[in-house]
Image (spheres, rainbow, N blue to C red):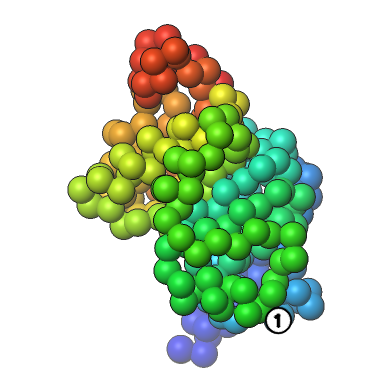
Amino acid sequence: MLFDCALMSQKHDKQKNVNLFHTARRLGIKLLHTDSRRYQTLNPIQKFEVMHAQEAIIAASEAGLLLKSHLSGKVLDFGCGLGGGALVLSYNGANVTAIDIDSKPIEEFSKYNLIDSVKIIQGDGIAYMDNLPENSLDLVTAFIFGPDFEGSLIRRFFATANHAMKPKGRILITSETGTLSLVDRNCCDGCGHFVSRNVFVVKGFEKSKKGVRGDSKNTVY
């Protein structure tokens, strides 16, 4: 019985991957195949990060909320972990900066030397965005964000991501539903969209002179 269940699960996962790659091909998005040499060199956590990022990117792109211009532009991967998400973004032509406040995953990421083209930083991602020139990022990704049950991290994150994001940029976040519900309440009216229970996209907007999120003069793109 357990063996039969395991076989069914493997078949389901295989079919899921086939469907994912068919959708990616239709959308013109590059994905790492599980049988590719690059994928096989990853450790189990990095493999999970890659698949998680790919599923989120495909879901947001299929919903029309993420464009190829975002994936091929200047991207900050916030809380990058072991670099699986940054690898996917770089594979699609993005100019990626990957940052994490925890030194251990950054050391592991750097040791694997996965992506020569990615700038890897160990530090505070919020402070980093705050010091960027305004309107400098096409996309901010935060895969497996939080959890944040009080909203303090979310508010700080959006204040700086808003500053750094271009008017037509995007913020792509994945997290558990409680955190994403707080995300929805803390971003401006009309610019946040649930793609699924665990994937959320914030669209850029033309900032008012005051630069206040939710100001009636802001135009959402």
The residue drawn where x is 46% and y is 72% is 103
**Is residue 21 rendered to the left or right of residue 212?**
right
Q: Residue furthest left?
A: 150
Q: State which quarter of the image contains the C terminus.
A: top right
Measuring from the top left, give residue 124's x and y in whole percent: 42, 56
Q: Residue furthest top?
A: 217
Residue bearing the label numbered 1: 41
> Badge 1: how crowded within 10 Å, few (<14), some, or many (20+)?
few
Secondary structure, mark 1, is loop
The residue drawn where x is 46% and y is 89% is 1
Amino acid type indicated by mark 1: Thr
Would residue 197 be seen by someone viewing this image from the given angle? Answer: yes
The residue drawn where x is 66% and y is 38% is 70
Would residue 19 be seen by someone viewing this image from the given angle? Answer: no
Measuring from the top left, give residue 143's x and y in whole percent: 49, 56
Measuring from the top left, give residue 179's x and y in whole percent: 31, 49
Q: Is residue 164 above or below residue 126?
A: above
Q: Quadrant of residue 26?
A: top right
